[in-house]
Structure formats: C-alpha cells, structure tokens
Amino acid sequence: MGEGMFPLERRERIMDLLKEKKVLKHAELTEELGISIDTLRRDLNILSENREIEKIYGGIKLVEDDFGESAMADRMVSRLEEKENIARLCNEQIQEGDCIYIDSGSTTYQLAKAIKNRKNLTVVTNSLPVITELINSEVELIIIGGKIRRHESSVVAYDYIFNFDELNIVKAFICASGITTERGISDYNLEEAVTRKKIIELSKEVYVAADHTKFGKEVTVRIAPLEKIDYIVTDQHVSSHWIEEFSTCKTKLLVSE
C-alpha cells in the first residue's frame, strides 16, 4: 500500500505521525505505512539528513528545535512553485474543445487549478482531488470507474467497469516518479500503472508532467518507453545534461519559464 505512495508523500505522513506521538518505533511505521523496512530506512535517512528527525535505537524522534519544520515547509513551497510553472505550461498546450486526461498526482493536480476558468473543455480523470477542484467550474467532467486507492485519492480502473475505447482523448497529462532515456517512465504502484498504460495507448498525444528531480531515476514499475511519450513538461531547474540528451529524442522536452 505505502510503497505506491510518492516518497515525498510518505515522508510527510511519517512527519504527521511523529508530530502526534513524538517518538515512533520502526515496527509501528512499517505497519502503519504498509512498507518494507528497506523503504522505511531510505525515507528515514533523508529525513535525518534534513534534520527533521533524530534516529534513536529501534526508532525515531522529532527534532526538538523548529529548524526541520521550516526546512520542510520551505521545500514544499519551492516545489509547489515548480509544479505551478509546469501546470501553466501544460495549460498552454490545451486548445478549446479538447478532451483531456488528467492523472492523479501532485503535479497534475496543479493543472486542474490552472484550467479552472476555461469553458469549452472535457476532463477525464481518475483523481478525486481533480474532480473536487473542478466540480464548480464549467469544465465537463468524466471520472473513471473502479477501486478507490485512498493514499493516492485516485480510482484504479478495471476494464469490465469502464469502456475506455469509447473515449476520444486528445491529450493525456500523466505523472511519473522516474524518467530515463533508456528505460522511459516508471512509477511506484502497479495498479496506477495499469490505468496509465491504458490511457497512453488511447490518447492521441501524451504529456508527462514531472519536476526536475524525476530525471535519471528508474523506480519499481515501468510504465512506458519514451517512444510512447510525445512531450515531457518540466521546470526550469532541469539540468542542461537532460536538455541535451532529449535534443536527439523524438520525445520533446518542454521547459517552463
């Protein structure tokens, strides 16, 4: 369950639990988050390096000063700005009358906010936050039927519930946790990947919305090779190495201002 969450989300959850209890044992965390001890150790190493937690024998405790708190808040704000920039650039790719797919994920959620005032659009989505964001707008909404994944606030589709092939999706905006030129795009959760693969097959154009930290990573589940992806939309902090690498690819890299 927890393995499918974005690492950032998992670490936020760890911090939330720690604020409630101040001290937590490793066993409590692996059970609560549904993750392996190896995954937990990776998360705790990052939180410890960022001075947000202190490691103690068999567990962790909250760092007593509020240095870690502000560091976490600052990072959320800085990453939020990057995601908003990516969303703005995605919005510029959308024409009047388009039927688009918006994936579940924190970057594509920002796209829902960006298109809120548009009139002539149809949005197909598996994301409950996207639906909530657009429920009072004039955007036509179609939600994919299936099983609810609580951690991602998304719906995982099953073919027998939903006839995908009837959908005329012009552009799909999907998320990924890892991008490499050799292996394409990858993510953490298998069920989420099934929906993404299906949407990639059906959509006329595929846009991957991902901030610069996703490049060079390959995570658990492979979603699609690069030849299936038309555009990757990222933020201005993407390194020149990747801009150069993508200059020879069929997949175009769109970099926000």
Image: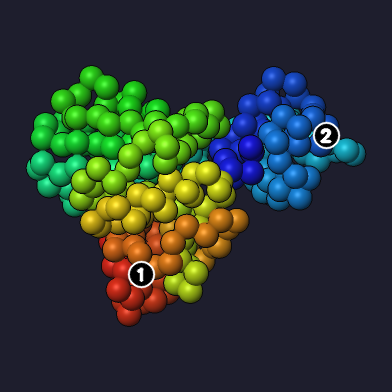
Helix, strand or loop at mark 2: helix
Amino acid type shown at disc 1: Glu
Q: Which one is closest to the eye, mark 2 or mark 1? A: 1
Quarter assignment of residue 251: bottom left
Please name the residue that numbered disc 1 is placed on. 227
Residue 222 vertical placement versus 29 (above, below): below
Q: Position of residue 199 (x, y in %)?
A: 35, 49
Report the residue at 57% width, 41% height from top. 5
Residue 161 vertical placement versus 191 (above, below): above
Q: Rate crowding at label 2 as few (under 14), some (14 to 19) or many (20 or more) other CA atoms within 10 Å.
A: few
Q: Earlier in the sequence, mark 2 or mark 1?
A: 2
Helix, strand or loop at mark 1: helix
Tell me if 90 is positioned left or right of 72 in this view. Answer: left
Please name the residue that numbered disc 2 is placed on. 27
Which numbered circle lies on residue 151? none
Quadrant including the C terminus: bottom left
